[in-house]
Image: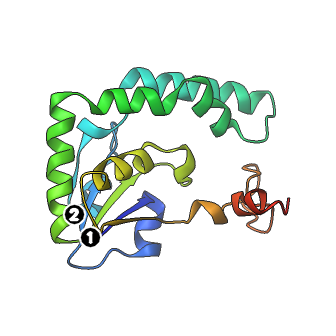
């Protein structure tokens, strides 16, 4: 089985199979979320204070013309540590257990707003789910190593994370 992650715009593009369970994992769902997921699970969305801190720093970095505001915000607010602390709550632990149980039986998809999984809680959530399992993989759609590092451009021909990892950029 596989735990997939994507953003709402990617659901139709990457197409979960009929037998997959598709879960929104957002705090503030729009009306269409019910149409593209089996259900939304706000308990494993980032807490309000973390979302607010992240968005505030990201907006300031954008205003300053920084090349990757999401990365600056992610690191500045200690996103990973704070999100993992959030997942320690009893309600969140119950959801993680349920997601792991489902992932034993079928593919599951975790869906939220961010296109780039590098700066998104769903990557952390997927890792927390598979940490409880054997022989279950995580696949991100799109693959973060293929996303251009310069977030100001939708041009996929710019340097990617893979280029930096291989020393090519």
Residue nearer the viewer, 130 or 51: 130
**Element marked by disc 1:** loop
Instruction: Name the one closer to the observer, 106 or 168.
Output: 168
Q: What is the spatial separation of the Cα atoms under label 2 and label 1, in whole angstroms?
A: 6 Å
User: Residue at point 29% right, 79% down?
Assistant: 17
Q: Pinpoint residue 64: horizontal percent, then vertical percent.
A: 80, 27
Numbered label attached to residue 121 = none
> In the visual, does 97 lie left or right of 151?
left
Q: Quadrant of residue 155?
A: bottom right
Residue sitting at x 49%, y 45%: 120
Up the image or down, 158 lies above or below 94; here it is below
- Residue at the bottom extreme, as displayed: 18
- Could you tell me residue 16's position as x and y percent? 33, 74
Task: Kindly identify which numbered label has been placed on residue 103.
Answer: 2
Q: Quadrant of the N terminus?
A: bottom left
Q: Does 122 sit left or right of 117 as displayed?
A: left
- According to the picture, the residue beneath numbered tag 1 turns out to be 107
112 in relation to 85, above or below: below
Asked where in the image residue 160 lies, by quadrant, the reply is: bottom right
């Amino acid at each position: 089985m596989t735990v997939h992650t994507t953003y709402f715009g990617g659901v139709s593009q990457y197409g979960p199979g009929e037998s997959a369970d598709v879960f929104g994992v957002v705090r503030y769902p729009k009306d269409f979320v019910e149409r593209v997921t089996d259900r939304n699970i706000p308990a494993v969305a980032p807490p309000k204070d973390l979302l607010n801190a992240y968005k505030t720093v990201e907006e300031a970095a954008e205003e300053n013309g920084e090349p990757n505001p999401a990365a600056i915000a992610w690191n500045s607010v200690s996103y990973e540590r704070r999100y993992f602390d959030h997942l320690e709550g009893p309600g969140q632990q119950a959801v993680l257990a349920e997601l792991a149980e489902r992932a034993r039986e079928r593919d599951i998809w975790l869906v939220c707003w961010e296109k780039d999984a590098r700066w998104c809680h769903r990557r952390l959530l997927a890792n927390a789910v598979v940490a409880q399992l054997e022989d279950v993989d995580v696949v991100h759609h799109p693959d973060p190593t293929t996303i251009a590092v310069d977030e100001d451009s939708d041009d996929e021909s710019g340097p990617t994370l893979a280029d930096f990892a291989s020393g090519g950029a």
